[in-house]
Image (cartoon, helix red, strand yellow):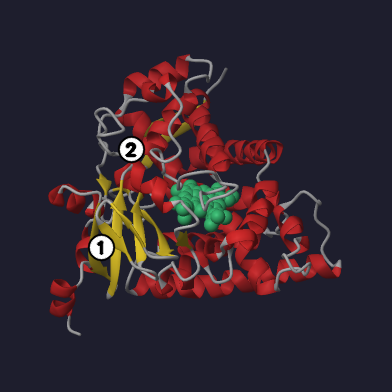
Amino acid sequence: MTFSDLKTADSTIALLRDPYRYISRRAADLGEDVFETRLLLRQTTCMTGAEAAGVFYDPARFQRAGAAPPPLQKTLFGQGGVQGLDGEHHRKRKAMFLQIIQPDRVEVLAELVTQHWRRAVGYWALAGQIDLYPQLQLLLTRAVCEWAGVPLPEAEVENRTRQLTALFDDAGDIGLGHRRSRAARKAAESWTADVIKQIRSGRLAVPDWSAASIIAHHQEPDGRPMEPRVAAVELLNVLRPTVATAVYITFVAHALEAHPTWRERLAQGNGTEDLAFIEEVRRTYPFFPAAAAIVREEFDWRGHRFPQGRRVLLDLYGTNHDPRTWQQPTRFDPERFLREDPDPFAFVPQGGGDPAVHHRCPGEPVATRLMGTALDQLTRHLTYTPVQPLAAVDYRRLPALPKGGYRIKSISARRH
Ligand code: HEM
């Protein structure tokens, strides 16, 4: 098949050109919440909106085994992890993540991250100017490894940060980036598998509550521990997305600059409105475009047949901007989160439904807490100046980021 065949027979190019808005724009053009197309040479059904999310997260209708496109399994997700499990096996593995991410553990991580922010500010002040996104990757890698019970000698920080970042930052690429991401997965899995083996053999002592310990000792439904390779994937399922929070934190900085009235209001406030601002950042800024599942048994919905085995994509970005559930969806308005709690199928930046039962992300408390730490630092503990005029967000990049990064200068700790 040639490039031009792909262009006409397959919507992959259209999706890659506008990964966050392709589904909602096409659905709006067709006047439907559901449409069929070919993506990555496979017949695919795309869905958008809160009602579609309710259907998508029904485990009787959909399974996750075989849902992730192979290029993403070899990079972003790895093989054998919780993302591709179903039923009882999924619930049990998911309970392991919820145990790792208990509220008091999240507070410990937030405290570590705050300490690393304070330390980093000293270096940033000397550096003159910094690009926030790569600096946050380093800071978060240091903090999450310490928290998770993964030894990280200072000499390895840059290399491991590069690897963890390549797992998500290069995974959406189709060329060189994809190869970099695959190589990073191999190296990172071998690293975390070694940590698991060391814990199991008693050569490495880590706290019982740490992610590495919980994963090393987790029992599968058959009572056995996970294979080291699978445990390695699950440990990376904690490290990688915590480092990926650097994307959201960069957007917090971007949103504070874009909405100076809110910056001032938060800086003067006592923190009670911080979460509303953070939720509006997660709603409005792009991160994960869509979630994938496979039809378990044939059914019909909204006049569309969903045949068994069909891959289905749920539009996350578009659902967060659906005018039927969000008034003036493109307006940045944190007050909407002060007025009411969001519907679990309408607000889906990290998936929908119930994290204990569905495939919704278990890491939302980590993401929102670390965004909160960053917001506190940026508004109440630091002074800095953006280097360039506010850049637009690059919607073609995966994950999206401000064009040219987010550079700041004249950084110093505020005296209280
Ligand atoms: C950086 C911000 C994050 C974003 C944008 C994000 C996004 C997502 C999305 C969209 C899903 C898939 C939902 C679905 O398939 O229905 C997911 C699943 C998952 N996330 Fe996150 N996530 C983030 C942070 C985290 C953190 C901090 C952790 C762990 C510490 C984490 C661990 C996981 C795991 C283990 C799954 C698989 C859940 C399952 O299949 O049941 N994520 N995430």
- Which percent across, then down, holds residue 267? 46, 19
- Which percent across, then down, holds residue 264? 39, 18
| Nearest the eye: 155 or 375 | 375
Task: Give the quadrant of the C terminus.
Answer: top right
Q: Quick one: SS at disc 1?
A: helix
Give the vertical position of 211 relative to 224 (above or below).
above
Query: Residue, x 29% and y 58% (percent of image)?
Result: 46
Give the vertical position of 72 relative to 132 (above or below).
below
Query: Residue, x 65% and y 73% (percent of image)?
Result: 229
Q: Earlier in the sequence, mark 2 or mark 1?
A: 1
Query: Residue, x 52% and y 23% (percent of image)?
Result: 414
Give the vertical position of 2 relative to 134 (above or below).
below
Task: Give the quadrant of the N terminus.
Answer: bottom left
Residue tagged 2: 284
- Which percent across, then down, holds residue 313? 35, 58
Q: In this orientation, does residue 102 appear?
A: yes
Q: Quick one: SS at disc 2?
A: helix
Q: Mark 1 packing: few (<14 Cα in 10 Å), some, or many (20+)? A: some
- In screen coordinates, is 225 left or right of 291? right
The kind of residue tagged 1 is Leu
| Nearest the eye: 229 or 57 | 57
Pointer 1 residue Cβ closer than 8 Å to ligand 1: no
Query: Residue, x 60% and y 71% (percent of image)?
Result: 189
Residue tagged 1: 16
Return the residue found at the far bottom: 1
